[in-house]
Image: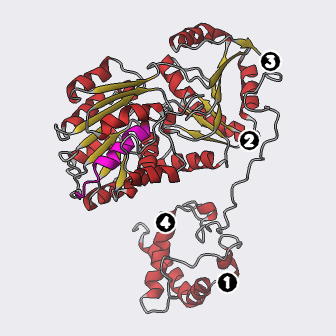
Amino acid sequence: MTTDTTPTFTDLGVPAVIADALTRDGITAPFPIQTDTLPDTLAGKDVLGRGKTGSGKTLAFSIPLATRLADGTRSAPRRPRGLVLAPTRELATQIAKTLTPLAKAQKLSVTTIFGGVSQNRQVEALRRGIDIVVACPGRLEDLMGQGEVDLSDVRIAVLDEADHMADLGFLPGVTRILRATDPAGQRLLFSATLDSQVQKLVDRFLTDPVEHSVDSAQSPVAAMTHHVYEVADGGAKKELIRRLAAGNGRRILFMRTKHKAKRLAQQLTKAGIPAVDLHGNLSQNARDRNLKAFSSGEAMVLVATDIAARGVHVDDVELVVHVDPPAEHKAFLHRSGRTARAGSGGDVVTIVLPEERRDVESMLRKAKISVRPQRVQPATAPVPGGSGDAPVAPRRAPAADTAAPAQPREGRPGGQGGDRDGRPARSRNRNRNRRRGGAGRSGAGAPRTEGGPTAAPVGAQPGAGRRTGASAPAAARASVGATAGPQRRQRRRSSRGAGAPQA
C-alpha cells in the first residue's frame, strides 16, 4: 500500500490566503515545477526554472510575486515593485489573468503593458500606482523613454518564455529593462530551453541561481499522442484539413503565415465549421474577441500562427494540427503544447506533403518524437478526438445593420461631386452663391438649417424635393425665383453686351 506524499501548497510555505484563492479556482495540489521551485522562490533566491510548455510555470512565479510583495508597502506612482516580461500580448494577458486573483487576495494591483493598443489607460494606471506590471518589452521601453515608468523599485523581476524572447530578437531590450531594475532584487527566469543567448542573461543578472528542471528541456509530453499523415497533393490536404477541423472538441490549426491563417478560418466558417483566426495583423480588440469566442465554445476551431499562439492557454484543447509543419523543432514543441496541458491528454497531427517528408523527419528526430508516418486518404483518415463527419453548427450570419443608409446630398446623385447636368461642384456653388447674393441680402431667402440643405426623406430619390417642390427650401427658392428671375436675365444680357468687342 502506498501513501500520497505530494505536498500541499501550505506545506511549501504558501500563505493560507493565497492557497484559498487557488482552491477557489479549482487548484488544490501543486505541479512538479511548483513543488520544486516554491521553497526557493518564496525564500527570495534567484531561480532558473526549465520546464515544458503547460507544466505550470506561470503559477510557479505568480505565487512568490503575490506573497513577497504583500509587506504593507504601497507602490509609488510610476514605480512598480514587481515586473513580469513576456514575449507576446496574448501571453502577457494570460499571465495577468492567472496572477490577478492571487494579487487581489493580498490587496495588490496588477496591470498589463503592451503595444497594439493606446497607451493612455496604461499610463493612467501607472500614474495611480501599480504594484505588479506584466509587460512586453517594446511598449515598456517606450514608456520608460517617456518617463512614465521607473523600474528602480522593482524588487522581483520575472522573465517568462526566455527562449522565445531570444528567438524574436528581444534580448537586447530585455537586457536594458533588467538593468533598470533594483540590482539587489530577486530575479526569476523561466524557459523551456536554455540556449547560449539565454545563458548570457543568467550569467549577467542572476546571483547564485538555483536551477530546477522538470523533464528534459526538449522533452515531449507523455500524455500527448502524435500522428503524421502523409497526403498525395494539395487538394487532398485541403479535404483532410476540413475533416480534421470538423467535430465537437476544441482544435487549433497552425499555419506558417498570417494571410494563410486568415484565409483558412474564413474557408472553414463558410463550410459550416465556425472558426476564428489569431495572428499578428489583428488589433488587440480583435484578438481578444477571437480568443473569447474560442474559449467560450462559440468557435471550436482556432487557426493561428506560431507567435500569436504563445499566449493561448485554453483548457480542453483536444487536437492540434500542424497544417504547415514548422521549420524547427522548438516551434513544433511549443505548438504541440497547446494540448495535453495540466495532466490532460491530447492529440497532435502533422500533415505532410511528399516534398516535406525529409524535413519533417529531421524535425521530429530533434524533438525526440518517435512516430510512424501514415499515408492516408482524406475521406477515411482517422480523426483523433472525434469523427470528422460529425455535424457542425451552421455559420451564423452577422447581425443586420438596422441603421438607415446615408442619403446623398440633394443634386448629387450617388454622392458624387457633379450635378445632374454634369457641371462640376465648383461652378455650381459659384452660381448658387450669386443667387444668394441677389436675393438673400434683403432677408428674403429661406432660412438654412445647420449643416446645409435639408436631406431628402429616407427612401426618396435624390433631388426629388427640387423637382416636386415638396421640400421647404425648394419651395422658398421657387418663390424668390419668381421675382428675381427677370432681374438675373437682364444682368446676363447686360453682361454679354458689355463684353462685346468695340467697333
Q: Secondary structure at mark 3?
A: loop
Q: CA distance from mark 3 to mark 4?
A: 69 Å
Q: Nearer the viewer, mark 1 or mark 3?
A: 3
Q: Is residue 63 above or below residue 224?
A: below
- Residue 61 is a magenta residue: yes
User: Counting residues from the N terminus, which is met first, the one under dot 3 or under dot 2?
Assistant: 2
Which label sits on residue 427? 4
What amino acid type should be assigned to the residue bearing mark 4?
Ser
Q: Residue 443, image x and y in percent? A: 45, 92
Q: Earlier in the sequence, mark 3 or mark 4?
A: 3
Task: Give the answer, above or below, for where 44 lies relative to 153.
Answer: above
Q: Which residue is mark 3?
A: 377
Q: Residue at x 58, y 69 (%)?
A: 409
In percent of width and height, residue 393 lies at 77, 46
- Residue 469 is tagged as 1
- Disc 2 on helix, strand or loop? helix
Q: Is residue 151 visible?
A: yes
Tell me the quarter of the picture where residue 125 sits.
bottom left
Image quarter (top left, top right, bottom left or bottom right) of the N terminus: top right
Crowding near pointer 4: few (<14 within 10 Å), some, many (20+)? few
Report crowding for label 3: few under 14, some 14 to 19, many 20 or more residues within 10 A (C-alpha).
some
Q: CA distance from mark 3 to mark 2?
A: 23 Å
- Is 93 located above or below residue 173 in the figure? below
Q: Which residue is mark 2?
A: 270
Q: Nearer the viewer, mark 3 or mark 4?
A: 3
Q: From which residue to which does the magenta span run?
A: 58-74
| Camera-side residue of 336 and 375 | 336
In three-dimensional space, the C-alpha distance between marks 2 and 4, rounded to whole angstroms, equals 50 Å
Residue 464 x/y as whole percent? 68, 75
Given residues 33 and 252, the one toward you in this image is: 33
| Circle 4: element type | helix
Marks 1/4: CA–CA distance: 24 Å
